[in-house]
Image (cartoon, grey):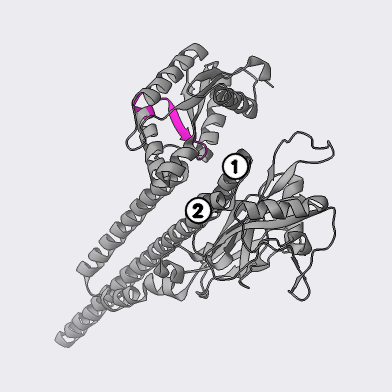
Amino acid sequence: MMSTRQNALKASDVALCGLVCLAGVAVTFLVLILFVRSEQRTVNVAFQLEVDERFSRLQRRFNTQVLKLDVVRRFFINADDVTEKEFLGFVTPLVGEDEAYSWVSRILEKDLQAFRAKALRNGTSDFSYHEINPDTGERVPLTRRPEHWILLYLLKRDDVKIIPGMDVLARPGRQALMSKARETRQIVVSQPLKMTNGQSGIFFVAPVFQELSGVPLSDDNLQGFVVSTVRLASLMEQGIPLPSLQRLNVTLSLIDTQHQGENIYQSSAPAAPSALYAQRLLKVADQNYLIRFRPSSTFLVANSYTLSISLIIVFGSGLTLLLTLMVYLLITQRARALSLVDERTQDLRLLNITDHLTGVYNRRYFEELMERLLIEANVQYRPLSLIMFDVDHFKQINDRWGHQCGDNVLKSLCARIRSATRKTDLLCRTGGEEFALICPDTELNNTRLLAEKLRALISTLPFDEVGQVTCSFGVATWIPSESFDAFIRRADSAMYRAKASGRDQVQLADMEQIG
């Protein structure tokens, strides 16, 4: 009987040990499942954050190239005759590493000799008409054509020497790109082309048209092209820290029928086997790009949780305290990941809607605001007014005092405007020195009085370093059923009428322009 009881106790001990072991294994297995899923979500969040940050950088980089080219295009449109000195003085602050800017003039065959003489008088040295044979790459004399596209000015950072006077029409890739810009009258972006230094680059082309007297009606008044080039690898990598470059594998491809799925850029970090993947659509001028992101081995190693799994398997079954601690760590890790997502999402949202220099809303957000406010005004029958204004002679401020001083003027100007307007009034920077003030629930007369107040506030108080600065204002109030473009066009026309009438004044939009 005693032997039977001892055997029964031993059996109960074994059973208890088995139950504890099974419970420990079950709890450990449950914790292991929860931990793996949480870490997978955390790694996925970290990957998405890395992708969002990289895409935001690339988007700003591409858009900055377009904006800089548009600034130079406006410079040529607003200038009667640009000398080489003026070109270099205006463009030099814009040119970064691996970038080049050039001016290509449209010249008729009969005007070649006179154009060369004028170029030499304006300071262009070593000017020689020639073109590049597309087959041999050698310089050859000009071919007779009704018109020529002559490279006149060029500013670049490398040591490759280009003699002014080259006819771009002889190079098929350049000719097709510029012809497209001429036909669409918009900025266009090339597929990767060979740059003068032999590397692959992206060409941004902006046509310049001017209304000139004495030009036949059949002529489209094309004056030439502003061209900027940048090395593709530099465009995709410049300004990105090396650790960030090593964490992601990035490929860039064009979205069109001819190059569907063909990669035009491949980052140096190879993709590691992983289910993590993301893609983003990038629209630049007339070109659509698809950017694909995959993690590299560096990213996976930095976010690996293999050791944690091993620790859970080894110690989790016998240590309840460790089990409790691991559950606590999982909860806190998840909370930290969600908090990081919210924080980074807010930061990215702020970067996307504000102008980096002045801190006011940017043009993209201006258009979003206007579309939303126009819908509200139409549905709720509420007035909506808009003030468009532009700093007078801002180019002279930059030329005389420097671009840093010009930037300080823009920042001070925005600070004054904000101090004199309501919290509901929304200040946006729509261009280099152009701004828009959205005034919800405001009639035309009150908006005009506000514009006069702002004009006096700006012109009467001198700015540091530059003294007096003035602005020209255009005021418009939305009319029901009026389109967004028509509304903006009326306010913009009023502003330019203020500039044409002597500047430093407020003009009201014409009602006849509606529609």
Which residue corresponds to mark 1? 74
* Magenta run includes residue 422: yes
Which residue corresponds to mark 2? 94
Name the element at disc 2. Answer: helix
Q: Nearer the viewer, residue 443 or 300?
A: 443
Amino acid type at circle 1 is Arg
> Would you identify the image quadrant in which residue 320 lies?
bottom left
* Magenta run includes residue 436: no
Name the element at disc 1. Answer: helix
Relative to 461, is 443 above or below?
A: above
- Residue 284: x and y in percent read 61, 52
Amino acid type at circle 2 is Leu
Mark closer to the chain start, 2 or 1:
1
- Residue 407: x and y in percent read 40, 42
- Residue 126: x and y in percent read 64, 64
Which residue is at a point 76% across and 64% down the rendered structure image?
A: 171
Q: Which residues are magenta?
A: 417-434
- The residues bearing labels 2 and 1 have C-alpha atoms spaced at a distance of 14 Å
Q: Find the residue positioned furthest to the top.
A: 445
Q: Nearer the viewer, residue 467 or 355?
A: 467
Q: Nearer the viewer, residue 415 or 350?
A: 415
Q: Is residue 416 left or right of residue 14?
A: right
- Residue 152: x and y in percent read 66, 56
